Image (cartoon, rainbow, N blue to C red):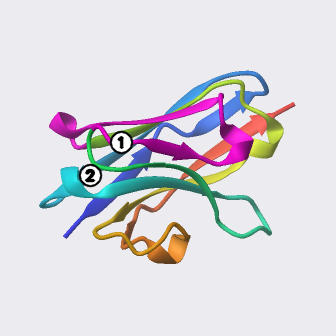
Amino acid sequence: QVQLVESGGGLVQAGGSLRLSCAASGRTFSSYAMGWFRQAPGKEREFVARIGWPGASTSYAESVKGRFTISRDSTKNTVYLQMNSLKVDDTGVYYCAAQVRYRGTSPDAYDYWGQGTQVTVSS
């Protein structure tokens, strides 16, 4: 029983910043691991960032380390992805996902998905 709605995507020039938000509703949201994934046209969905329960460690794809930051605010039932120093290669549809219980780190291991928000980075 989790609903996820992403927002904050848009068009930005390379080097710019965007902050994505994922508004969540449903019981025990604060105990779920949350992840951000992205999918570029013609490519497979790929992992971007993950955060566990509040206070847990975060993890990032190597390609976004030092540029992206995932965070969560359980009081607002929202997960964020701050994206700085954006590159053209960051273009894609960004999805947030929730994992009820740990089943791995691949997209198939997540239980709930939002509809995605488009991020387009121009040169």
Q: Position of residue 55 (x, y in %)?
A: 29, 37
Mark 1 is surrounded, within 10 Å at the Cα level, by few (under 14), some (14 to 19) or many (20 or more) other residues, namely: many
What residue is drawn where x is 28% and y is 68%? 100
* Residue 40 spot, x, y in % from top left: 73, 59
Q: Quadrant of residue 79?
A: top left
> Helix, strand, or loop for circle 1?
strand
Report the residue marked by disc 1: 79
Label 2 CA crowd tier, 10 Å (few <14, some 14–19, many 20+): many
The amino acid at mark 2 is: Ala
Mark 2–mark 1 distance (CA, rounded to whole Å) = 8 Å
Q: In this figure, which residue is indicated by the disc labeled 2? A: 24
**Horizontal and vertical percent position of residue 46:** 65, 61
Which residue shows up at 27% across the image and 62% down it?
3
Q: Quadrant of residue 41?
A: bottom right
Give how far across and how far down residue 104 sits, in percent: 47, 71
Q: Is residue 100 left or right of residue 20?
A: left
Residue 64 - label: none
For image coordinates 38% across by 54% down, the residue present is 34
Q: Which residues are magenta?
A: 55-77
Residue type of the residue flagged with mark 1: Val
Q: Is residue 72 magenta?
A: yes
Q: Considering the image in quadrants, where does the C terminus appear? A: top right
